[in-house]
Image: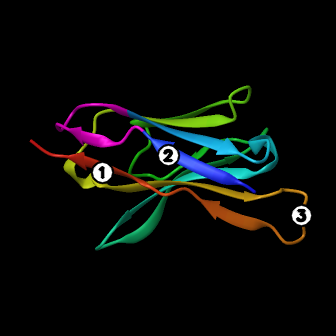
């Protein structure tokens, strides 16, 4: 069974940084389309970044130049480095895995979410 576990959220001041982790178990994540999303009561769940193995990373315009996705295939873990954080980045952040990529009926898995709060 595929499981995703996020960690690394917390409270940070505007301009600060955080790094989120998403550990994937039950499958090698290289065969999935991976992504980071965030959810607020006002905006619902929005895409932050997404990638498939071998393809480019696509970022939401609101985070381009500030957020960076990376991955460690050996650890089956992906990361979201968030710099220059703004109060509007406050949200629950989720990692997502859709796949396997070769499947005609891909399944979307979600982690439990981690809260990021940007405030003085």
Q: For the residues labelled 3 and 2, say whether their Cβ atoms are less than 8 Å apart.
A: no
Residue depicted at x 85% and y 72%: 105
Instruction: Tell me which numbered mark, 1 or 3, is placed earlier along the sequence.
Output: 1
Q: Which residue is mark 3?
A: 103
Hey, which quadrant is residue 101 in on the image? bottom right
Looking at the rendered structure, the secondary structure element under dot 2 is: strand
Please tell me whether mark 1 or mark 3 is closer to you in this view. Answer: 3
Using a 10 Å C-alpha cutoff, classify the residue at mark 1 as few (fewer than 14 neighbours), some (14 to 19) or many (20 or more): many
Q: Residues within 10 Å of mark 3 (few under 14, many from 20)?
A: few
The residue identified by callout 2 is 6
Is the N terminus in the top left, top right, bottom left or bottom right quadrant?
A: bottom right
- The residue range painted magenta reads 8-18
Residue with the mark numbered 1 = 89
* Residue 113: image location, x then y, percent: 45, 55
Is residue 80 depicted above or below 35 in this figure? Answer: above
The alpha-carbon separation of the residues under discs 1 and 3 comes to: 34 Å
């Amino acid at each position: 069974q595929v499981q995703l576990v996020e960690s690394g959220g917390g409270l940070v001041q505007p301009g600060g940084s955080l790094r989120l982790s998403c550990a994937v178990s039950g499958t090698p994540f290289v065969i999935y389309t991976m992504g980071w999303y965030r959810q607020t009561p006002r905006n619902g769940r929005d895409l932050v970044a997404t990638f498939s193995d071998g393809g480019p990373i696509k970022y939401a315009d609101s985070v381009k130049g500030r957020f960076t996705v990376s991955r460690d295939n050996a650890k089956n873990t992906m990361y979201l480095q968030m710099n220059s954080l703004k109060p509007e980045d406050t949200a629950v952040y989720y990692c997502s895995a859709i796949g396997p990529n070769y499947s005609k009926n891909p399944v979307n898995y979600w982690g439990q979410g981690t809260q990021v709060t940007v405030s003085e």
